[in-house]
Amino acid sequence: MNTTTREMLPYLLRTGQFVGVTFRKKDGTLRRLAGRTGVAKHTTGQGLSFNPADRGMIVMWERNKANRKGENDKGYRFVTLDAVTEVRANHQVYTVIGNG
């Protein structure tokens, strides 16, 4: 089993790489997300009104999630780095250790 620290998460989730993350949502449930970081397609070019890194977040483009109607629901998601429990990247699975 591979382990990593929270400080290493930005390096594992580097721009342009397909990764998977498991994190705890605000309501306490676990959520798995598979997607890519650094995607800018289908954006307005206006940018965000805040910097996600200042809030301890990373922006990911989710490649495939079935919505309630059974259709694929692709889109941008914010992941709070302090809530991440597992990362799947570089053909490895990393368990995140440390405070969160």
Image (cartoon, rainbow, N blue to C red):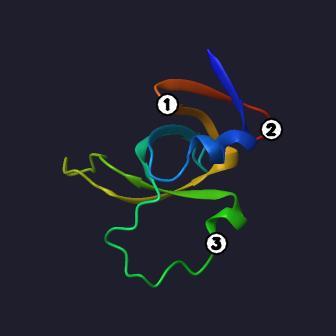
Residue 83 location (% of width, % of height): 65, 44
Dividing the picture into quarters, in which one does residue 18 lie?
Answer: top left
Asked which secondary structure carries label 2, the reply is loop
- Residue annotated with mark 1: 90
Answer with left or right where residue 45 lies relative to residue 26. left
Residue farthest along the bottom direction in this orientation: 46
Residue 5 location (% of width, % of height): 74, 34
Dot 3 or dot 1, earlier in sequence: 3
- Residue annotated with mark 2: 99
The residue located at (37%, 81%) in the rendering is: 44
Identify which amino acid the numbered label 1 is placed on. Answer: Asn
Q: Nearer the viewer, mark 3 or mark 1?
A: 1
The residue located at (26%, 50%) in the rendering is: 68
Identify which amino acid the numbered label 3 is placed on. Answer: Asn
Answer with left or right where residue 92 lies relative to residue 98. left
Residue 93 location (% of width, % of height): 53, 24
- Residue annotated with mark 3: 51
**Front-lying residue, 16 or 99:** 16
Gap in angstroms between the C-alphas marked 3 and 1 = 26 Å
The residue located at (72%, 66%) in the rendering is: 54
Q: Are marks 3 and 1 in contact (CB under 8 Å)?
A: no
Asked which secondary structure carries label 1, the reply is loop
Question: Can residue 29 be seen at all in this image of the molecule?
Answer: no
Asked which secondary structure carries label 3, the reply is loop
Residue farthest along the top direction in this orientation: 1
**Front-lying residue, 66 or 94:** 94
Identify which amino acid the numbered label 2 is placed on. Answer: Asn
